[in-house]
């Protein structure tokens, strides 16, 4: 039927006539039964006429023009000229309805070769939009299509881990890049992880995309692009097989420097997270090539960064009423009081009269307005959002746009005040509001260990069992020749084990705490520990826990790119085993482990906190490095340390162990003149469900249910000092 119409001698005039328009009013009285099918065919066939014009160019009805344009992505790309492409782009900017249909259709052409509607086209359209327009059109389409987008991200993440990646994947990566504008938290985090997978496989192409993203006016995009870039750099930089990454890092770091930190930089940023990702990448690149930046250039990376323009200077002057309206619409009490309020040292909660707070808060709101926040335009969609705290376990949480622009401005103000030394002295050099670990560690691997049987008899007398029950002997697992096919021998640095009786409520838990002590203090340590009635309550000090350090940063003495002072979250200069916290009679020890204490509320993509790794001092001395998605640290010879879990919480046997390869431990002990001593203790107890538990107080008195043991590691090294 379409070919029949094409034979009309005056088809263009007929299409513009009342009769022609009526035939294509889809679904309305007077329209043809097959109107849409015929119209769709005409879009594809019309350009083959001698005039080479597209159908939309010969239509007068605006609705038909839009429908014809929307069908052009499905037509022969060789027949689509510049005029059609430009009209399509203009329609996307002028019509929300057109744009949302177009976004879906452009997804199918994003990776096409030599297609006028490929990802370069969509990139250009989105780049030309203001933040306000882009969020109302594109970001809202992403939210409405979130289920489909998430499926796409999962598919691409898997594909980019295993498939060969050609230039079409770069276009797909650019499409994923633009989903980072989203306020749908779990989707944005998933997109970041997907891009991380691409960055690990194709670092050169990804770094180009990341630098390209610095020109995007919405900081949500480059912030997470550089998060993925930093995560990929952290996990692969030390791998001698990752030749492309090691070659690309110094080159891209020079571009980052020129773009963001050099005097006259084209796209500088003060956004705390974004800036730290970039500084971290540069710091890692300098480990590979220490001279790619001169000392003069490297000085431009240091605070106070006064050579860079401050985003809060020279802002447009907004009427006070405009600022107040935006504040009321966007900044709710918790965000204004607790989050923004923490930027002001010494400010009390709810002290809205604090002079510095009264200066900072309007500056943040003004910056939001400058970025594109408009309470009137966003009011309708913001009412639909399930916006809560920045972090939370609800994976369906979606931030209001007021919150999005608020976070951007807050992190910029944080970055400015940190560089100028205007934050409280106890604040870390990384905001506690950090929302994702860009190294995306996986769940720890599990292991089965040969454990002694503790519950071979039946429970007869609960009190007698508490006092005279088993003394676990775990000597057989302190040194293991092979784990998961990996040759050691492997030596325990730290461990925890809980065994539960299969037929009753008895349970025994044990801490296997390794400490490093001067060789001359071993006997005194053993005597002190033996005399402890209760080794808990930090009598044996715990190693440091790092809550805001990324998994890939754990081996470093100091976080790449961050100031050294104040950035160690919980490390102490000295650890002492002592009967009480105020005694001077304790024994100084080193704790050979550190804990990755990242908490799961930050992101659905980061649920693997709690791993126990060799201490920063051990990692530094033995050149241990993180490996992609694994808790096994590596050295030049291969796997150097292991973290393994046993069972699950509440199961018959559960716990975790941190192991170090024996040759590495021996080398460290020899050079440091230290001795590894295992201080093992725990309790015989009953599950809280045990009905007689409340009648056993006298048996718990004096810590009679405690079990203890001590062992000294025998090094095989022959060159001990």
Image (cartoon, helix red, strand yellow):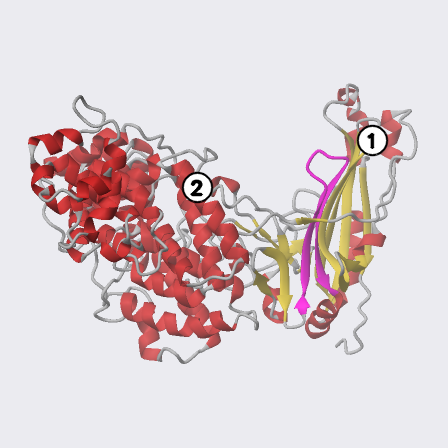
Within 10 Å of disc 2 (Cα), the crowding (few <14, some 14-19, many 20+) is: some
Crowd band around label 1 with a 10 angstrom C-alpha radius: few (<14), some (14–19), many (20+): few
Q: Is residue 425 visible?
A: yes
Q: Read off the residue under disc 2.
A: 150
Which mark, by number, is residue 502? Answer: 1
Give yes or no for residue 246 being in the magenta stretch.
no
Where in the figure is residue 268, as x and y percent of width and height? 26, 62
**Contact flag, marks 1 and 2 (Cβ < 8 Å):** no
Label drawn at residue 640: none
Q: In this rendering, would 484 be left or right of 341? A: right
Q: Nearer the viewer, residue 580 or 240?
A: 240
The quadrant of the image that shows the C terminus is bottom right
Q: Is residue 533 visible?
A: no
- Give coordinates of residue 40: x percent, y percent: 26, 40
Which region shows up in magenta? 638-661
Q: Position of residue 132 (x, y in %)?
A: 20, 43
Secondary structure that dominates the magenta span? strand
Question: Which residue occupies 82% across, 28% down?
Answer: 699
Is 243 left, or right, of 648 in this rendering?
left
Q: Position of 265 compared to 179: left or right?
A: left
Residue 650 is covered by the magenta coloring? yes
């Amino acid at each position: 039927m379409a070919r029949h119409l094409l034979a009309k001698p005056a088809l263009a005039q007929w299409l513009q006539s009342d009769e022609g328009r009526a035939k294509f009013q889809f679904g309305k009285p007077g329209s043809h039964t097959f109107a849409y099918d015929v119209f769709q065919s005409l879009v594809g066939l019309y350009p083959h006429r001698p005039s080479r014009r597209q159908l939309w160019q010969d239509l007068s009805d605006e609705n038909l023009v839009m429908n014809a344009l929307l069908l052009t992505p499905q037509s022969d790309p060789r027949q689509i000229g510049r005029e059609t492409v430009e009209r399509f782009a203009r329609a996307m900017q002028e019509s929300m309805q057109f744009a949302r249909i177009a976004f879906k259709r452009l997804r199918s052409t994003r990776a096409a070769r030599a297609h006028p509607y490929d990802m370069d086209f969509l990139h250009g359209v989105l780049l030309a939009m203001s933040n306000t327009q882009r969020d109302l059109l594109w970001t809202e389409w992403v939210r409405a299509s979130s289920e489909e987008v998430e499926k796409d991200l999962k598919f691409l993440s898997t594909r980019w881990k295993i498939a060969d990646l050609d230039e079409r994947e770069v276009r797909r990566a650019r499409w994923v890049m633009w989903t980072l504008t989203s306020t749908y938290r779990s989707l944005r985090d998933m997109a970041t992880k997907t891009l991380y997978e691409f960055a690990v496989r194709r670092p050169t192409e990804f770094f180009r995309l990341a630098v390209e993203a610095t020109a995007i006016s919405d900081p949500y995009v480059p912030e997470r692009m550089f998060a993925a870039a930093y995560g990929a750099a952290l996990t692969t930089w030390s791998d001698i097989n990752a030749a492309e990454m090691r070659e690309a890092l110094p080159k891209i770091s020079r571009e980052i420097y020129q773009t963001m930190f050099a005097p006259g930089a084209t796209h500088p940023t003060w956004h705390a997270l974004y800036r730290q990702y970039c500084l971290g990448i540069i710091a890692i690149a300098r480990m590979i090539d220490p001279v790619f930046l001169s000392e003069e250039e490297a000085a431009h990376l240091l605070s106070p960064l006064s050579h860079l323009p401050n985003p809060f200077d020279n802002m447009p002057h907004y009427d006070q009423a405009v600022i107040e309206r935006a504040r009321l619409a966007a900044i709710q009490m918790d965000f204004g009081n607790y989050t923004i309020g923490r930027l002001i040292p010494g400010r009390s909660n709810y002290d809205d009269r604090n002079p510095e707070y009264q200066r900072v808060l309007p500056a943040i709101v003004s910056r939001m307005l400058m970025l594109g926040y408009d309470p009137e335009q966003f009011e309708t969609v913001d009412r639909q959002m399930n916006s809560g705290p920045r972090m939370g376990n609800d994976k369906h949480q979606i931030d209001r746009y007021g919150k999005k622009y608020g976070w951007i401005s807050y992190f910029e103000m944080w970055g400015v005040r940190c560089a100028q030394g205007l934050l409280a002295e106890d604040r870390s050099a990384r905001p506690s509001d950090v929302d994702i670990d860009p190294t995306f560690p996986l769940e720890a691997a599990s292991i089965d260990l040969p454990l002694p049987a503790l519950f071979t008899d039946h429970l007869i007398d609960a009190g007698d069992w508490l006092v005279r029950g088993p003394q676990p002997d775990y000597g057989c697992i302190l040194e293991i020749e092979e784990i998961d096919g990996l040759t050691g021998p492997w030596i325990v640095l730290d461990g925890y084990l809980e065994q539960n009786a299969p037929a009753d409520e008895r349970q025994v838990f044990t801490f296997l705490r390794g400490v490093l002590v001067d060789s001359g203090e071993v006997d005194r340590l053993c005597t002190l520990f033996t005399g402890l009635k209760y080794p808990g309550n930090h009598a044996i000090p715990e190693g440091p826990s790092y809550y805001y350090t990324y998994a890939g940063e754990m081996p470093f003495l100091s976080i790449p790119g961050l100031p050294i002072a104040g950035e160690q979250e919980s490390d102490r200069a000295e650890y002492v085993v002592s009967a009480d916290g105020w005694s001077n009679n304790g024994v100084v020890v080193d704790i050979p482990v550190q804990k990755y204490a990242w908490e799961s509320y930050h992101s659905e993509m980061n649920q693997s906190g709690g791993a126990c790794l060799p201490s920063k001092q051990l990692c530094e001395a033995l050149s241990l490095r993180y490996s992609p998605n694994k808790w096994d640290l590596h050295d030049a010879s291969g796997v150097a340390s292991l973290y393994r879990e046993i069972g699950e919480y509440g199961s018959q046997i559960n716990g975790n162990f941190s192991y170090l390869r024996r040759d590495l431990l021996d080398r460290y002990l020899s050079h440091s003149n230290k001795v590894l001593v295992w201080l093992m203790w725990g309790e015989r107890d009953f599950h809280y469900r045990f009905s007689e538990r409340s009648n056993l107080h006298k048996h718990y008195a004096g810590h009679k249910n405690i079990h203890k043991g001590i062992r000294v590691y025998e090094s095989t090294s022959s060159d001990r000092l």
